[in-house]
Amino acid sequence: QVLLVESGGGLVQPGGSLRLSCAASGFTLDDYAIGWFRQAPGKEREGVSCISSTDSSTFYEDFVQGRFTISRDNAKNTVDLQMNSLKPDDTAVYYCAASLSPVFPPYEYDYWGQGTQVTVSS
């Protein structure tokens, strides 16, 4: 099977941290650019961050820059998103996606996970 599964979501207080993990089944994540997206209730899906398939190049949207870090763990075949200094506006379902796009940031994604809920509230 070709699957992506997100984990690590949960409830955290403002200013707290969570580490999300995107695990692959059926393919090697190192061959793909990986993106993290999120969608809050009543809002459109938005990109959060992505990491290149060929090197350590990363991209962050302005609203998470300096707070979130995307990284690869090839031994575990995962891509993680470390989220620090979380805000209530970060509350959303977070999705990871894999792309074979030859350019970075990717213009399309081939596989998507089912998402993990992140709730930031006091």
Image (cartoon, rainbow, N blue to C red):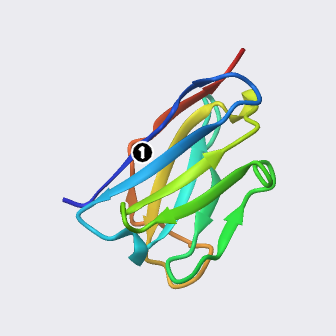
Q: Is residue 88 above or below residue 23?
A: above
Q: How many marks?
A: 1
Percent of width and height locating residue 45: 60, 45
Percent of width and height locating residue 22: 43, 52
In the image, what residue occupies the spot 57% across and 83% down? 103
Task: Look at the image and tell me in which quarter the N terminus lies.
Answer: bottom left
Q: Quadrant of residue 89?
A: top right
- Residue at the far top in the pictured view: 122
Q: Is residue 70 above or below residue 46?
A: below
In the image, what residue occupies the spot 46% across and 48% down? 21
In the image, what residue occupies the spot 37% across and 54% down? 23
Percent of width and height locating residue 97: 46, 58
Q: Is residue 34 above or below residue 117?
A: below
Residue type, label 1 = Glu
Percent of width and height locating residue 72: 50, 65
- Residue at the far left in the pictured view: 1
Which residue is the site of mark 1? 6
Q: Is residue 109 left or right of residue 68?
A: left
Disc 1 packing (10 Å; few <14; some 14–19; many ≥20): many
Q: Quadrant of residue 90?
A: top right
Task: Look at the image and tell me in which quarter the C terminus lies.
Answer: top right
Q: Is residue 54 left or right of residue 24?
A: right
In the image, what residue occupies the spot 41% across and 74% down? 30
Question: Of helix, strand and loop, which one carries label 1?
Answer: strand
